[in-house]
Image (cartoon, rainbow, N blue to C red):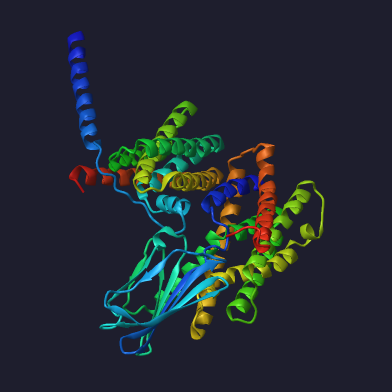
């Protein structure tokens, strides 16, 4: 029995390492696809436009706001301040380190956040804060590293962070106000679509699209 | 709550534009084909005092200067006139504005062809060149609309004034009246100034606009204290009065280009629509944010609530002093 368990554990470990290894290969730093938009109105507006026109950041931010809204006003407040703060910190790190990260890594945000919204799970505050902090740090880092290459710098990051703040406030505030059950279901459906987008993107990434 | 929303927006606003408002006056480059392949050029380079924005048109290599350049310094712009011969004409050729990539302003390029057709292009720091081909009326309209939106987005002082009004108004009906009267007032003076019936010199105008913001500071404090005043009771009248001033400010975005007579109505209409779109978008954003913060049950500390009012007053005071000093010649641009 113990041997079977051991073999199962070994086998499980090998699989896990295999999956992690494959994932690392997939995530290996690739040249960042700079989706930077220059509006001609200065770096802050460039930052705002960047988020608004980059689905890889925009859709997961929408998902995190939906998730926060489903969790209620407390989770909404937590997300409203934690995500922009983490985004800014991650962005500053990205500006300094400038190491490119494979942008397809953002599909993880689509899958995880979209999945959680669809499932409407009751997450503990600790899990929630960990999740949203990782999300903010990661996307912030991605933005920061791209901004460093484009010489947009800190002000561009301020524009992005402000937009993230505004977007979470508007979406989470709206979802919190929803009282009808069917509306909550509609939000969960939106989460499932986001997860589906993540699967599509992952497929493209694996296929080399 | 409303004050907290506005405080957050202020943070973005003031990091958005380090430039003093109205510095986004566009340049203007005009080609008029006077005979086949020969063009009169007018180049208006935005300037204030001795300071001229460093940008220059780069013409196609096939163009050679005929005659000498004439330069004339006018209030607000350095005007350069020249005549050039362009082998094969300008169609299909590219005109570039060197230095524009480093400047937060636009340059309107207009070409009058000998066959009576004309075209207009808006160049910006991100698109510093254009290939002359013949722009449609739709493209020209879009240029004016975009210019209006840009003007309000870059005009931090106009937005700050609107924010100040939002802090004072007590209910939705009053908000509607106030914003409508501000819109009406600045539309009137924008039209008057663009049509050339009246004009306001830029330095005193800028100082007066700053003063209008400063004026709102104490009124905001009175609102907090539960006191009343003429402005608090009738903010729409104050909005109308100061809106007349702000309209002259908006007009600088259009008049600096020296629009051709027959295009003025279209330009005026679409530029104003652009300004209104930007302004309405801004007001809606503030109101939606306020509602969202209420839904999320956020209790802001008292100092956060007080900050927007003080920011409006402080910046109003700063700009008033700065622009008055410029007006008196104590400070350069």
Furthest-front residue in this view: B68
Furthest-top residue in this view: A2
**Which residue is at 61% across, 39% downward?**
B298
Q: Is residue A41 left or right of residue B175?
A: left
- The quarter holding residue B197 reads bottom right
Identify which residue, B159 or B118, lies in the foreground: B118
**Which residue is at 21% across, 13% downward?**
A5
- The quarter holding residue B124 reads bottom left
Looking at the image, can residue A106 be seen?
yes
Q: Is residue B252 above or below residue B324?
A: below
Figure quadrant of the N terminus of chain A: top left
Q: Is residue B201 left or right of residue B126?
A: right
Looking at the image, can residue A113 be seen?
no
Provide residue B53's location: percent of width, then percent of height: 48, 64
Provide residue A71's location: percent of width, then percent of height: 50, 36
**Which residue is at 69% across, 64% downward?**
B208
Q: Is residue B312 above or below residue B182?
A: above
Provide residue A203's location: percent of width, then percent of height: 23, 44
Identify which residue, A51 or A181, lies in the foreground: A51
């Amino acid at each position: 029995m113990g041997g079977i368990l051991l073999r199962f554990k070994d086998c499980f470990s090998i699989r896990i390492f295999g999956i992690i290894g494959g994932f690392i290969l997939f995530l290996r730093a690739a040249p960042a696809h700079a989706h930077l938009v220059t509006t001609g109105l200065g770096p802050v507006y460039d930052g705002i436009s960047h988020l608004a026109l980059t689905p890889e950041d925009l859709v997961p931010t929408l998902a995190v706001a939906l998730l926060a809204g489903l969790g209620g006003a407390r989770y909404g407040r937590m997300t409203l301040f934690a995500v922009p703060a983490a985004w800014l910190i991650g962005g500053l790190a990205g500006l300094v380190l400038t190491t490119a990260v494979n942008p397809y890594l953002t599909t993880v945000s689509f899958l995880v956040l979209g999945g959680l919204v669809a499932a409407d799970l009751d997450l503990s505050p600790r899990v929630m804060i960990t999740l949203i902090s990782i999300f903010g740090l990661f996307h912030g880092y991605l933005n920061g590293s791209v901004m460093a290459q484009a010489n947009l710098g800190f002000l561009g990051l301020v524009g992005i962070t402000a937009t993230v703040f505004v977007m979470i406030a508007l979406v989470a505030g709206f979802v919190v106000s929803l009282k009808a059950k069917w509306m909550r279901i509609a939000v969960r459906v939106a989460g499932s679509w986001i997860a589906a987008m993540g699967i599509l993107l992952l497929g493209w990434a694996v296929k080399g699209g | 709550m409303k004050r907290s929303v506005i405080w957050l927006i202020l943070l973005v606003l003031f990091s958005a534009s380090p430039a003093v408002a109205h510095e986004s006056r566009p340049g203007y480059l005009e080609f008029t084909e006077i005979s086949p392949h020969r063009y009169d050029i007018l180049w208006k380079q935005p300037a204030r005092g001795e300071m001229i924005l460093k940008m220059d048109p780069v013409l196609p290599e096939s163009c050679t200067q005929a005659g000498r350049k004439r330069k004339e310094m006018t209030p607000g712009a350095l005007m350069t006139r020249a005549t050039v011969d362009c082998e094969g004409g300008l169609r299909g050729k590219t005109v570039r504005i060197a230095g524009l990539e480093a400047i937060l302003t636009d340059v309107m390029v207009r070409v009058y062809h000998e066959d009576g057709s004309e075209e207009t292009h808006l160049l910006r720091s991100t698109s510093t060149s254009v290939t002359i081909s013949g722009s449609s009326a739709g493209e020209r309209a879009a240029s004016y609309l975009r210019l209006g939106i840009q003007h309000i987005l870059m005009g931090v002082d106009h937005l700050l004034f609107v924010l100040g009004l939002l802090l004072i108004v007590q209910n939705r009906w009053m908000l509607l009246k106030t914003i409508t009267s501000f819109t009406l007032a600045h539309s009137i003076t924008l039209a008057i100034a663009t049509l050339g019936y009246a004009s306001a010199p830029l330095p005193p105008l800028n100082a007066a606009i700053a003063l209008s913001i400063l004026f709102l500071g104490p009124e905001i404090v009175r609102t907090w204290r539960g006191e009343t005043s003429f402005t608090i009771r009738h903010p729409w009248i104050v909005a109308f009065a100061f809106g007349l001033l702000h309209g002259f400010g908006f007009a600088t975005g259009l008049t600096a280009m020296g629009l051709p007579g027959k295009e003025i109505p279209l330009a005026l209409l679409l530029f104003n629509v652009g300004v209104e779109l930007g302004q309405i978008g801004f007001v809606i954003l503030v109101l939606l944010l306020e509602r969202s913060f209420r839904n999320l049950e956020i209790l802001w500390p008292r100092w956060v609530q007080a900050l927007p009012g003080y920011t409006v007053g402080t910046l109003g005071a700063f700009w008033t002093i700065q622009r008055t000093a410029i007006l008196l010649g104590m400070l350069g641009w």
